Amino acid sequence: MAINSTAEKIPDEKKAGKAADEKIGLLEKVGYGTGDLASNFIWTAMSTFIVYYYTDVIGIAAGIVGSIMLFSRIFDGVSDVLMGYVIDKTKSKHGKARPWLLWLSVPFAVSAVLLFMVPDVSTTWQVVYIAITYNVVCLVYTGLNVPYGTLNSLITQDQYQRSVLNVFRMSIALIGVLVVSNLTLPIANALGGQQFGWVITFMIFGSIGTALFIFTFKTTKERVKPVSVEQQKKTVPLKDSLKTLGKNKYWALASAFILLTYIFNALNSGAVVYYAEYILDNPLLVGLVTTAYTVFILVGMSIVAPITKRFGKRNAIIVGEIITIVGYLIMLIDLSSITLIVIGTVVRGIGKAPINGSMFALLGDTIEYGEWKTGIRNEGMVYSGGSMGIKVGSGLGTAIIGWVLAYGGYVGGSSVQSGSAILSIQALFVYIPMGITVLIMILLAFYNLDKKYPKIIEDLRARNAQ
């Protein structure tokens, strides 16, 4: 029996190794990238406009909104870990991650529309409704985003191809950011500008998002299997999977990096609408500022893959963050100058290109490190850390917006704001993001997996051969 078991084991492992080296075609790269475009039609629109919608359209106090967001995202962070474990247990003919894109694409769109359908009742019941619907949409997003992130590590094990997939993901996602930031307010205003207009806008976005998720499902393929055939046949217990994360220092660093990055992103996207209206005196400049930022991230990302291949992902990101600081220094020359704000934004966009192009590939590499160190491969659990960083980071960033506005005495819907409110808006758009950028550089100084990764893959393949 032992001889037969070995004879059966070797072909499976050879097949797994060959699949891991398979080249990824253009359609699959585009299909994978389209998944984040689908998310952005809903998630980015929410991140950019949800606080503004609740404060200026529905009339809820900014501090209350911020507290709801933070509580929801911390709760959602726990669900990310559980979803990662669910993915590692999932066994279907479509794989372990892909089927979730099919199963939850419609519920995600429906939950996002419900988020904007706040009933005309007392403020207390409106807050209750917002808390419930916001938690529901976050839970459904978890069910989509954790598998989607995990899919990168299941398509290929090649470090460079993962970076290329991530570049496609973030480049196409930024197209969604451009569309959402430039069209959300005009569409909502064209439909009346009140609650009805926002609801219809998100019905449109939700329908597009659902179709795009299905496209991702249809065009991608899971290839990578654990080195251990025994692990391929049975699920690792939750406590053992959690222990592997505790031993994976690079996973902790990568997850913390994503957390800080998404606090930054939430501040950058959520504060711009206030900055444009009350400091630049034109709310429609949201589209211009966001477009300048996004277009130059896209321009920079066109050369990210070869740069990271030569110098490493960490080094490219640190240099990018230094360029980001330069962009903020340009803004500080005159915070009310549209020209300087746009120039500084362009520089920031160039600086953020390596971050957007490498972030999730950086996290993906920690899967192999964890497998090499512990013998357990748990893609879902690893990517739950990234998703948790996205959720908690976005929630904390959104909460900071509400809290800082409340502390500064911001009055929603008022045409004139106090000096302290104006200062709070400047802090959200410039000063706090600058501080986060410095923290990211300090954090990544301790991440040196790029140098070790080739040897780790070599060791894993040697185990495979045995």
Image (cartoon, rainbow, N blue to C red):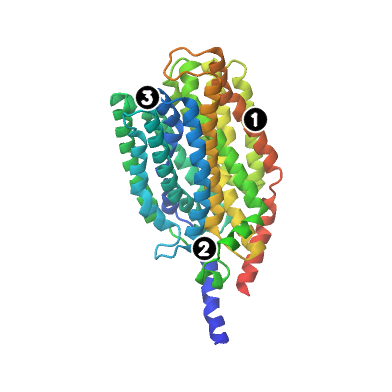
Q: Where is residue 357 in the image (x, y as percent from the top left)?
A: 55, 43
CA separation, marks 2 and 1? 39 Å
Of the two numbered discs 2 and 1 on the same chain, state the one appearing first in sequence: 2
- Observer-nearest of 117 and 426: 117
Q: Foreground residue, 411 or 350?
A: 411
Give the Cα distance between marks 3 and 2: 48 Å
Label 3 vs label 2, nearer the camera: 3
x and y, in percent, of residue 61 in the image: 45, 25
Q: Which is more foreground, mark 3 or mark 1? A: 3
Q: Is residue 45 above or below residue 308?
A: above
Quarter of the image for the N terminus: give it. Answer: bottom right
Q: Is residue 341 left or right of residue 213?
A: right
**Percent x, y for residue 266?**
52, 33
Query: In the displayed structure, would residue 1 be above or below residue 276?
Result: below
Q: Check disc 3 and report its element: helix, strand or loop.
A: helix
SS for dot 1: helix
**Looking at the image, can residue 362 be seen?**
yes
User: Residue 407: x, y in percent?
Assistant: 56, 22
Residue 116 image-quadrant placement: top left
For the point 31% across and 42% down, the residue is 207
Crowding near the residue tagged with mark 1, few <14, some 14–19, many ≥20 C-alpha atoms within 10 Å: few
Q: What residue type is labelled 2?
A: Val
Circles 2 and 1: CB atoms closer than 8 Å = no
Q: Which residue is drawn at 60% across and 30% down?
A: 433
Residue marked by disc 2: 224
Marks 3 and 2, the one that precedes in the sequence: 3
Q: Looking at the image, is mark 2 or mark 1 nearer the viewer?
A: 1
Q: Mark 1 points at which residue?
A: 435
Rendered view: 164 above or below 396: below
Looking at marks 3 and 1 on the same chain, the residue that comes earlier in the sequence is marked by: 3
Which residue corresponds to mark 3?
A: 57
